[in-house]
Image (cartoon, grey):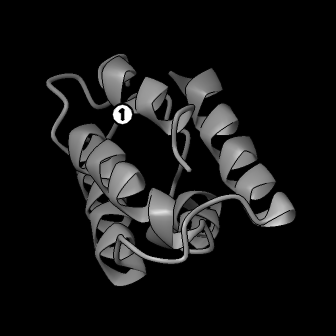
Amino acid sequence: MKRQLLGVLGLVLSFAAIGCGSSSGGDPAATQTSCTAYCTAYLAAACPTPMYTSASDCQSSECTQASTAPAGCQSTLKTYYDCRATQADICGDTGCTAEFAALNNCH
C-alpha cells in the first residue's frame, strides 16, 4: 500500500498538471478533513515503522496534493481517505484497494 500512496500522489499531480477533471462535484474541504482524519488515525496507531512521524509530515505528504486535485476527483479522494482512516490494519495499510483503483477512473 505504501507504493499505492506514492501512486495516488502521482495520480493527483498528473490530474493537476493536465487539467483533468470536471469543474463541478466534490468538496476539497471535505477531502482535506478526511485526509487529516487519516493522518490522525495513522499517528494514533503508533505503527512500529511509521511512514510519518508527525501530523505535519503526514499532511504535507498526503493532504496538500489531495486538496489540489480537480473538483471531479474530490469525492473519490474523500472516499479513499475515509477508507484508509478506518482500515482494520492501518499500519499495514493493505486495505482500500477498491478505493485506490477508483482513483484510476477519476475524471
The residue at the point 52 percent across, 44 percent down is: 106
Q: Is residue 40 left or right of residue 9?
A: left
The quarter holding residue 16 reads bottom right
Q: Would you say residue 92 is visible in this rendering?
A: no
Could you tell me which residue is drawn at 23 percent across and 39 percent down?
A: 83
28 vs 78: above or below: below
Question: Where on the picture, by quarter, is residue 6?
Answer: top right
Vertical position of residue 102 compared to residue 74: above or below: above
- Residue at 58% over, 36% down: 5
For badge 1, the amino acid type reads Cys
Element type at mark 1: loop
The picture places residue 39, in percent across and down from the top left corner, at 37, 58
Give the residue furthest to the bottom: 29
Q: Is residue 89 left or right of residue 36?
A: left
Q: Is residue 48 above or below residue 17?
A: above
Q: Position of residue 54 (x, y in %)?
A: 49, 63
Is residue 82 found left or right of 98 in the rendered image? Answer: left
Specify whether residue 26 is in view. Answer: yes
Residue at image coords 53%, 49% = 52
Residue behind mark 1: 47
Front-most of residues 59 and 69 = 69
Neighbourhood count class around disc 1 (C-alpha, 10 Å): few under 14, some 14–19, many 20 upward: some
